[in-house]
Image: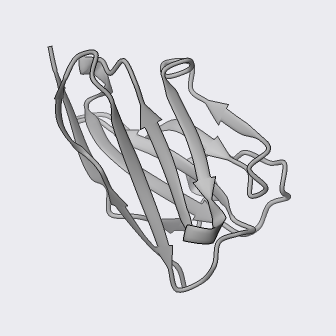
Amino acid sequence: QVQLVESGGGLVQAGDSLRLSCAASGRTFSTFALGWFRQAPGKGREFVSAIGWSGGTTAYADSVKGRFTISRDTAKNTVYLQMDSLKPEDTAVYYCAADPHYDDYQTITLAYEYDYWGQGTQVTVSS
């Protein structure tokens, strides 16, 4: 069993930056595909970014490309999402996800393909 705990959310102004962290416990996730999703009020869960378990491949939603950066620290069992140039439309609850069933180069963009989820952290961007 894997437990994921997100942190780093908060209330910021448009143009500011935040770094989200997701720490895993219960099992090392050095060979897990990892991802970030978000859900705004009244909307479905949306893919944000993903990283392969080797860290060599990444993927981003078009809406965040060039502004967000995903990374992982295997030694710390943690995945990060650096969010720059935040916009009000980035306001959402952000979730990290993990799954052990993929090859090292694969980035997983579909929510149903992840086995493990965190509880989420709120990000609010004011205009």
- x 75%, y 68%: residue: 31
Q: Is residue 17 above or below residue 29?
A: above
Residue nearer the viewer, 77 or 52? 77
Which one is nearer the viewer's eye here, 125 or 89? 125
Q: Position of residue 107 (x, y in %)?
A: 73, 45
- At a point 63% along the width and 70% down the height, the residue shown is 75
Quadrant of the drawing holding the N terminus: bottom right
Q: How far from the left and from the top, in percent, is residue 118?
A: 40, 64
Quarter residue 87 falls in = top left
Q: Is residue 25 left or right of residue 5?
A: right
Q: Kindly identify the residue that appears in the image at 49 percent across and 22 percent down.
A: 64
Q: Residue at x 47, y 42 (%)?
A: 81
Spot occupied by residue 62 in the image (x, y as percentages of width and height): 56, 18
Q: Is residue 9 above or below residue 41?
A: below
Q: Position of residue 17 (x, y in %)?
A: 32, 28
Locate residue 106 relative to residue 59 in the image: left or right.
right
Q: How many marks?
A: 0
| Colouring of the image | one colour
Q: Quadrant of the C terminus?
A: top left
